[in-house]
Amino acid sequence: MATGMDRHKSAISYLKPGDWLTLLLGSILVGVLVMKLWGGGAADKAIIRSGGKVFKIVPLSRDQQIDVPGPLGISVISIQNHKARITTDPSPRQYCVRQGWLQQSGEIALCLPNQVSIELTGSQKKYDSISY
């Protein structure tokens, strides 16, 4: 007959060393698959839009700074070390500036009040629920 203590044993106490190894390897496999399949590939060019129209398409291989006109003024886009970001923008809340550096294909920064955006593209695109 089982005692009260046996009935309250946790499930962890029933795991054997082989079970722990299986859990560890399974967790590593899931992590690798998420990194490989969920993330976008490396970007090779940036599409800059102003007022909903393509302003310029530039390669990420050359460091440069681009002034993009918008209804509120000039937004400055910086490209360095195969990454891009909106450095300055006249929009009041500065959300697009705070977004920081973009480096994977499919990443986008939007400055809605100034109608300026930058999108990175490459051979592989990062998919999300909207583009799926």
Image (tube, helix red, strand yellow):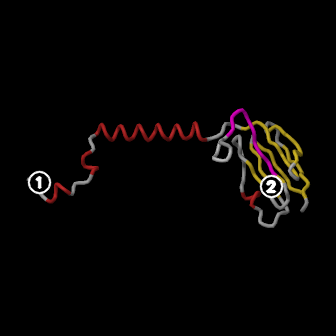
Which residue appears at 54% of the width and 41% of the height? 34
Residue 50 lies, in percent from the top left, at 87, 51
Residue extending furthest toward the bottom: 92
Q: Label 2: how many residues lie within 10 Å, few (<14), some (14-19) or many (20+)?
A: some
Name the N-terminal-most of marks 1 and 2. 1
- Numbered badge on residue 93: none
Q: Label 1: how many residues lie within 10 Å, few (<14), some (14-19) or many (20+)?
A: few
Circle 1 SS class? loop
Circle 2 SS class? strand
Residue 6 lies, in percent from the top left, at 16, 54
Which residue appears at 16% of the width and 58% of the height? 5
Kindly indicate the quadrant of the structure image that contains residue 79: top right
Q: Which residue is mark 1?
A: 2
- Numbered badge on residue 87: 2
- Residue 120 located within the stretch drawn in magenta: yes
Kindly indicate the quadrant of the structure image that contains residue 91: bottom right
Asked if residue 12 is positioned above or below residue 114 in the image, the reply reads above
Q: Which residues are magenta?
A: 117-125
> Quadrant where the C terminus lies?
top right
- Name which residue type carries label 1: Ala
- Per the picture, the main secondary structure of the magenta-coloured stretch is strand
User: CB atoms at circles 1 and 2 under 8 Å apart?
Assistant: no
Asked if residue 112 is positioned above or below residue 13 in the image, the reply reads below
Total labels drawn: 2
The one of 1 and 76 positioned closer to us in this rendering: 1
Residue 99 lies, in percent from the top left, at 71, 55
Q: Is residue 63 left or right of residue 34?
A: right
Which residue appears at 50% of the width and 41% of the height? 31
Residue 83 lies, in percent from the top left, at 74, 44
- Residue 79 located within the stretch drawn in magenta: no
- Name which residue type carries label 2: Thr
